[in-house]
């Protein structure tokens, strides 16, 4: 994992590089409704388009699909059961987990730590 943004906060570093989690409901991006894109706060890689964002009720920004080839995944058992964790392919930063309870057309929920994202309005 590579720190590319020297302005990251301690909380951002904890989530990105130590696989931490921000508190649910704490991200201002939960209420973001404008058209645009979401980028990795560390390396600025474009990860999600706003058209794939939806309100999951989970407390974290959620998306039903990412852009192609932007994440690598692995299985973690930190909570005692298997979850699919995803990391930025460019910098290795941890963003969240993928669940199979999202809306169609994918049925996926990318549950992302908002602190790891930058929103760029179109």
Image: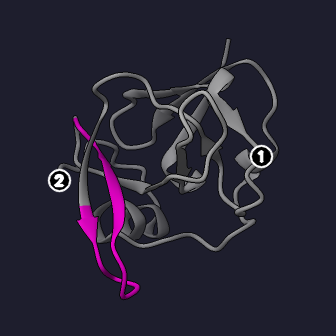
Left or right position of 29 against 19:
right
Residue beneath disc 2: 1
Q: Which residues are magenta?
A: 75-89
* Residue 50, above or below 110: above
Q: Specify whether residue 120 is in view.
A: no
Q: Quadrant of residue 35?
A: top right
Q: Give the left or right position of residue 63, taking residue 67 as reference.
A: right
- Between marks 1 and 2 in the image, the one whose residue lies nearer the viewer: 1
Q: Nearer the viewer, residue 119 or 25?
A: 25
Residue at (34% x, 59% y) in the render: 85
Spatial CA span between label 1 and label 2 = 30 Å
- Residue name at image x 25 percent, y 64 percent: 75
Q: Position of residue 40 (x, y in %)?
A: 42, 38
What residue sits right under mark 1 in the picture?
55
Q: Is residue 113 above or below residue 33?
A: below
Mark 1 neighbour density, 10 Å: few (under 14) some (14–19) many (20 or more): few
Residue 76 within the magenta-colored segment of the rendering = yes
Point out the image quarter for the C terminus. Answer: top right
Q: Based on the displayed image, in which of its 4 quarters is residue 15 positioned?
A: bottom left
What SS does tag 1 mark?
loop
From this viewpoint, is residue 47 visible? yes
Q: Is residue 119 magenta?
A: no
Q: Secondary structure at mark 2?
A: loop
Disc with the residue nearer the chain's start (1 vs 2): 2
Rendered image coloring scheme: one colour
- Residue 118: which disc? none
């Amino acid at each position: 994992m590579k720190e590319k943004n020297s302005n990251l906060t301690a909380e951002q570093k904890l989530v990105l590089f130590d696989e931490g989690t921000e508190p649910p409901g704490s991200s201002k991006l939960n209420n973001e409704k404008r058209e645009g894109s979401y980028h990795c706060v560390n390396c600025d890689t474009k990860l999600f388009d706003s058209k794939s964002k939806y309100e999951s009720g989970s407390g974290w920004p959620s998306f039903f699909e990412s852009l192609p080839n932007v994440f690598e995944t692995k299985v973690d058992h930190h909570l005692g059961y298997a979850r699919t964790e995803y990391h930025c392919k460019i910098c290795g930063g941890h963003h969240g987990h993928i669940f199979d309870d999202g809306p169609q057309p994918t049925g996926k929920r990318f549950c992302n730590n908002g602190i790891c994202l930058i929103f760029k309005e179109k």
